[in-house]
Image (cartoon, rainbow, N blue to C red):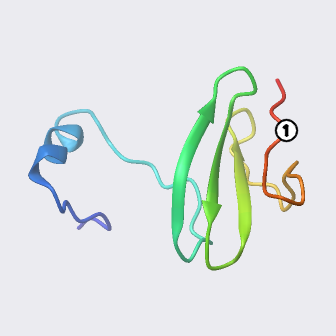
């Protein structure tokens, strides 16, 4: 059984063979984005209802409780 539902059949080839989806975080109510920053090796996305930006660190596999974000929601990219 899978927790992912394919809403558009054009996405089906992404889930065949040795390809798989990995859940990185489950604490968002409604997430959108994401953007991957190769230089910093992290992924950023927004959790709109909770009014926050989240960052997944590829090197640790963790989502810290803080994010380097300005008050206006802009992000200071580092790496």
Residue appearing at x 37%, y 47% in the figure: 21
- Determine the residue located farthest toward the front in the rendered image: 72
Report x, y in % for residue 37: 66, 30
Residue 37's place in the image compared with 6, above or below, is above
- Determine the residue located farthest toward the top in the rendered image: 39
Q: How many marks?
A: 1
Residue appearing at x 68%, y 44% in the figure: 61
- Determine the residue located farthest toward the left in the rendered image: 9
Report x, y in % for residue 5: 23, 65
Q: Quadrant of the N terminus?
A: bottom left
Residue 72's place in the image compared with 42, above or below, is below
Residue appearing at x 72%, y 20% in the figure: 39
Q: Is residue 22 left or right of residue 60?
A: left
Q: Is residue 6 left or right of residue 56?
A: left
Report x, y in % for residue 43: 64, 41
Picture quadrant where residue 27 is located: bottom right
Report x, y in % for residue 10: 12, 45
Residue in the foreground of this view, choosing between 19 and 51: 51
Q: Label 1, on which residue?
A: 76
Picture quadrant where residue 29 is located: bottom right
Q: Circle 1 sits in a helix, a strand or a loop, which is it?
A: loop
Q: Quadrant of the C terminus?
A: top right
Q: Sort mark 1 into few (<14), some (14-19) or many (20+) by Cα contacts within 10 Å.
A: few
Residue 44's place in the image compared with 19, above or below, is below
Q: Is residue 14 left or right of residue 31?
A: left
Residue appearing at x 62%, y 79% in the figure: 49
Residue 70's place in the image compared with 27, above or below, is above
């Amino acid at each position: 059984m899978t927790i992912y539902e394919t809403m558009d059949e054009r996405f089906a080839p992404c889930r065949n063979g040795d390809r798989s989806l990995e859940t990185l975080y489950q604490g968002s109510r409604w997430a959108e984005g994401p953007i991957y920053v190769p230089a910093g090796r992290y992924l950023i996305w927004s959790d709109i209802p909770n009014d926050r930006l989240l960052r997944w660190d590829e090197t640790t596999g963790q989502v810290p409780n803080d994010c380097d974000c300005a008050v206006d929601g802009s992000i200071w990219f580092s790496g």
